Amino acid sequence: MMPRWQRGGWAAGEGHLSAICAKTPKGEACCEWVGQDGAGHFVKMTTTASEYGDMQLICEAYQLMKEGLGADQREMHDVFTNGTRGNWTGYLIEINARHSGPQGSGDRRQVLR
């Protein structure tokens, strides 16, 4: 969270926002006052660009595995699933792992093809 308030507003609201925001693995709040003049918009733009970079990497890895290596859907699902247990983690990897495999008990269809 990147609230854009005057310093006094941040002092009044910091505790509440820190309580409801995401936390780091160490339990630190992912919330910080970044200024009152739109600095939060710049930070958000930067984090959004990073997420788009992650999505591009995932798409290129998927295409490389499918077209370059000839991997089938199960193999690609295993790569994404095993990635969530190692260094290649994050929300975008997790949703790819979840949606690249069978979608239910006995269901052999995949969302990604």
Image (spheres, helix red, strand yellow):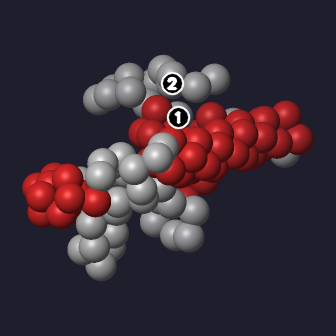
Please state which amino acid type lies under the numbered disc 2.
Gln
> Residue at 30% of width from left, 48% of height from top?
5
Placement of the C terminus among the 4 image quadrants = top right
Please state which amino acid type lies under the numbered disc 1.
Ser
The secondary structure type at the circle numbered 1 is: loop
> Disc 2 and disc 1: Cα gap in Å?
6 Å
> Residue at 20% of width from left, 59% of height from top?
8
Above/below status of 112 relative to 37: above
Q: Position of residue 19 (x, y in %)?
A: 13, 59
| Sequence order check, earlier mark of 2 and 1 | 1
The secondary structure type at the circle numbered 2 is: loop
In this rendering, position of residue 32 left or right of residue 102: left
Residue tagged 1: 100
Above/below status of 11 relative to 111: below
Q: Position of residue 77 (x, y in %)?
A: 56, 43
* Residue 6 visible here: yes
Q: Position of residue 55 (x, y in %)?
A: 64, 40
> Residue at 36% of width from left, 46% of height from top?
4
* Residue 82 visible here: no
> Residue at 47% of width from left, 55% of height from top?
90
Disc 2 to disc 1: CB gap under 8 Å: yes
In this rendering, position of residue 32 left or right of residue 55: left
Q: Which mark is residue 110?
A: 2
